[in-house]
Amino acid sequence: MKVSLPRPQTEVKVLEGDSLQERFRALETSPVLRARTLHGLLEVSGAAAFLNHPVQSQDQDRVTLHYRTTTRLDMISQRLLQEGAPVSVINATTATHVIIAVFYGAQAFFVFDSKNKISEKNTEMKKVVKKMTSLVCSDLHLDVKEKTKSLYDCSLYIDVGSWKSPVSFDKAVEIYGSLPTLLGSKGERAVPLKVWLYPLKKLDKSSVCAALSEVSETLMHQAENILEHLRKQIRICQNLMTSQTNLTVIMWFPALKDKLIEFSELLKEYKEDLQREITEMDEVIHVKDEKVKNKLQNILARHRQSPFSAEKTNKWLENKETELKTLNDCKAADITVVKSQAELQQIIGHSQMTRVMCLTLFSPEAKDLFLATLKQHIESHNTVQNDSLLLRPVSINQKVLIDVQLFIAAKEANDDTEQTKFIAASVSGDCFQEYSVQFYHAGTIMSRNVKLGLKPDPPQIAHIQHTNVSLKLNHLLNKSTERYVVEYGVVSNDGMDNTWKQIVYPEALKELHVLSGLEQDTEYQLRYAVADNQCMSNFSWIGNFKTASAARPGQPSVKMNRDAIIVSWLKAESDEDCPVLRYMVEYKEAGLEGWSSVQTQGPECECTLTVPHSTCYRVRVSAVYENITSKPSEETPVPVDVWSIDLSVRKSSILLEVLKLQRLKKPVELMGWSDEENEVKGFLQCLPYISQLRFTQPERISCEEWEKQKRSFLLNLCLQAALTDTPGTTETNVETLLSVEEYEKCGFLLDLCSHVKDYESQTGRSVLPALQPIYQSAPAAWIIKLSERKSSILLEVLKLQTEKKPVELRDWTDEESEVKGFLQCLPYISQLRFAVPHNKTAESWNKRKRLFILDLCLQAALHQKETIEETVKKLLSSVNYQKGDFLLDLCSHVKDYETQTGRSVLPALQPIYQSAPAVWSIKLSERKSSILLEVLKLQTEKKPVELRDWTDEESEVKGFLQCLPYISQLRFDLKGEPAVKFLLKLFVSELEFDANQGENCTELLTSVCSYTSFPFNEDYFEYQIVQCDFLLDLYSHVKNYESQTGRSVLPALQPIYQSVSAVWSINLSERKSSILLEVLKLQTEKKPVELRDWTDEESEVKGFLQCLPYISDLRFAVPHNKTTRSWDKRKRLFILDLCLQAALHQKETIEETVKKLLSSVNYQKCDFLLDLCSHVKDYETQTGRSVLPALQPIYQSAPAVWSIKLSERKSSILLEVLKLQTEKKPVELRDWTDEESEVKGFLQCLPYISQLR
């Protein structure tokens, strides 16, 4: 009776929407099933549980993936339906329908929600999910980069399997990949996706029962939309309360949150009641007819008329969203929002805030009539009340939002933040109309309705006078004007002054308005607003003006007599309309506040001031007009008096009383004083009232004695200042005393320290710490003569400093105790300097400086071994002293000390010598070699020694030989014969020592000389040329020495010649080639030879020819004093001479010789062979000897083609060359002459030519 048809099909898609209708559509549910599910009459599970998934939040991104697969369709036979069912079955009350078909398969919903609360778009999420659906199951993975982007939560609703939702993204991908295998190989785990029912009563053909008319799908959709809309509004309420953006505002206004909660609860309650009504109706949907449809229509109509209709609830929510946005905008613009009238009054009454602009907002505390209506509707069991039909939420129109933005823009454009404050007020009351701007000035309300969008044109200045200005103010179009509100203020250097002043002109119809009470010659800023009985405009743009200035008199001049000051000035250039009535003369004590004044009787330009001469005054004059007074003239100072006193005759207490009567400090000039302690203390009390301390030398005292007395008095004053120390006074008093007579600060502070130390020794009191602030602000460098002061005083002074400073020595003593004392000062010195004396030569001064440095280093080695390196480094930086010379001098100095005292000092200096220079440079003519030996022994590794000069004394030569074991290389700073002779003497002495001692120490000398650049440093300019000259000279001297003495020295030198540079450079015009030959024979391998010059003598050419077998490469240096052309010609001639001599004396090796010579010059082989033939022919003609046959092997290996210029060469030469060949070769003519003889000559060559080119 059952038919089963296979229906394998799989569909995967991404749902575009998330509404309830979209979910029903995805599940393909009928309207009746939708209604029963919506009303809670059906329980859903598996994939259908997707219907109950939470609604998407406004701040949340969501993508839903729907997977649907089908396996088979099972149906009952059509014959059963045609035959009908038994009557017993049809009349059964427990069944109404028969299942006629079932569609099997499975569904799955993957709901991906972004973990981030806010996201711009879900485009990326869709791309990732769509890519997931496109991958093959066997290779189901995502790229790492995409996977990191896909951090989403996944809720899973599926018909098969036992997974618990939610799952991770990776798990969701894994489940998706396994979906095709979940139903089993034969689809045995598939579930019904769709069931077709057939009414039993229709099977009875005789039944007169009509089929039930079901409710239309349109009405069901309307009911669904209403419930869905209520659910969305509840969700919006939750979003508004929980949004991160609104969190601060919600906490700020809890009443606002309470209203949102109340609104949400009312919506939930109404939704439940509505859902219950529809559910009760749906239970009887199969037993009623048209009445059911009418009842549902009535429910929907009643909802549309209720306060819960979408229009009204949407409007209420929109208002709340606007209120929240307004508060958030205020918060973002840093606008203070006050919530009570007390807070508002506190800001308005703030003494520094002249102007307050207040935006009045809604009051969250006020009762919400719409919420009350909603509550009343529910309590009346959803009965529509007539009065509720009229109540709607107040709409906040777009103009209000624009006004709020204008307010914020005005606040941001406000430059006068000190006087003007922008606030918002959320205060209830009749005086606070919502979303209006109120303006307060000086605590008084000026307008309760400021229209910021209205701005009048700038004010026009009609007439300007000294103290007033006439204004022409403008009306606003289409606005009646009752009054003007004008604000003005003085312009200061940094913009506006502290306050805006305000004046209101009630007579708006007047053409001109006078602003009076202004200051003359002053710049003002001005703005105004237009007001009527309903509102006030915004203030206009600011305009500037400056009042007229009154002429002021010229700068006064001052004359003084015994009892008065006479002041005169130039008159003020006033107008005839405004004459000067009199002048006001002001005077004051310099540095004090306030002016005293007197006025003249008339416009005369002179005034006499009777003021005491003991104080200092400044004067100025102003012109007085009828209503105004001009600005004062430039000020003129009055000369200052000076107090002159002899304190050896008068008491310092009397001077103190007189000085206290002054209002300004004056100089005091001392002609004498007493050294009594109480008098010194008394004068110390006078210092705060003295502007400057001066001294006048009496005629009876010499300058030297006077300076001594002054210094003693000043030191006693500083001592008493330290003894009677009060915070800050000691330093001030000492600075005042230091300014006296430009007294040298370093000398004074050192004398003061010595003076205080003596006092401390006598009394046992501690005074020096009180003077520490003075020494901490000491000069940038301490200057001292240690020949006149003790180093112990300098040490005390340096210890008082908080940071190290330089010390400059002008002189010193060589006493050991003082040197040791100064050594203790070094840790407190940043740098040691030496002044240049005027009475000594630079050479003697440098010698003395170096000796002092050496003494200090010696004392450091004796007493400061731990810090010896740091000490020596600091001392060396203070003098121009080569480190090598210093270390040699130090060693000599220490050795002398050790000899005198018997003490061992040198080992303590070993760390210094281990960090010695890379090369020891020494003049043995000035130093003993024994000192160098001591220094070298202190090294941990051998280093080169460079000799700048030396002595030929045998003892010193032998002494230097003892240094050789500690030397890595021996170098010479001087070139030429002296260095050669000295080196030869060293070798001779070493050979004699070996002969006497029976040892072989010559190898040691040879080893220190066996290096590439011997005897110079590689940095030496053109050391290779000088090196070759040196070694050749050395060889010459050695050969001469051997000839004279019969002794053998040369073998000892052979390693030196074998280790020298890669190229021998020689001038054969100055040296014999035989010397070069001997030197080359000493080499173990051939090396290049570079000729700088040579001689054309046959014997020397022949001699150099013998050198060629020992030369790897022949080169020619480029001279600086010859042209390239002449040099090339000379080189070629030399090569031809060498080839000629080779043909005469080295016939066996002629080819090899020619090849080597040709490689040394730029010489075409054809030209060379032709030149050589010509050169040989000339020689044969001159001597009668036959040479050309010996050259035949060269010409037989001639070039493949002979190339010749017959305009430069004789054809006879070519003929000779061609005859030497064993076979004919082509000839290439590059040029020729038309002379008959040459043409005939060339004709004779043709038999020996294979081809003419």
Image (cartoon, grey):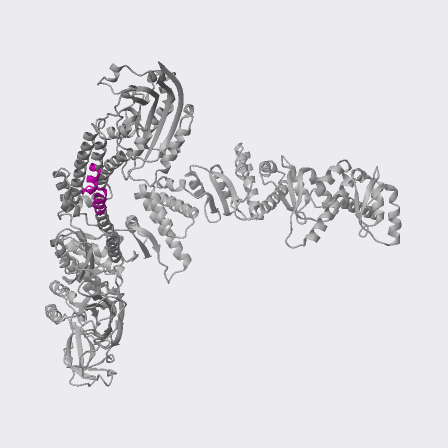
Residue at 24% in and 14% down: 88
Residue 811 appears in the figure: no
Quadrant in the picture for the N terminus? top left
Comparing 568 with 895, the one in front is: 568
Comparing 1144 with 272, the one in front is: 272
Q: How many marks?
A: 0
Establish if 913 lies above or below 781: above
The reply, left or right, for residue 1172 in relation to residue 365 is: right
Establish if 770 lies above or below 20: below
Residue 313 part of the magenta-drawn span: yes
Task: Give percent across and percent down for residue 703.
Answer: 25, 70
Establish if 1162 lies above or below 570: above
Task: Give percent across and percent down for residue 644.
Answer: 17, 73
The reply, left or right, for residue 116 in relation to residue 423 is: right
Q: To which quarter of the image does residue 621 belong?
A: bottom left
Comparing 166 with 519, the one in front is: 166
Residue 1010 appears in the figure: yes
Q: To which quarter of the image does residue 989 belong?
A: top right
Comparing 735 with 626, the one in front is: 626
The reply, left or right, for residue 973 in relation to residue 165 is: right
Establish if 262 lies above or below 498: above
Task: Give percent across and percent down for residue 268.
Answer: 18, 36
Residue at 17% in and 77% down: 586
Task: Give percent across and percent down for residue 211.
Answer: 27, 26
Residue 820 part of the magenta-drawn span: no
Residue at 63% in and 36% down: 1083
* Magenta segment boundaries in residue numbering: 298-319
Quadrant in the picture for the C terminus? top right
Characterize the magenta stretch by its predominant secondary structure: helix
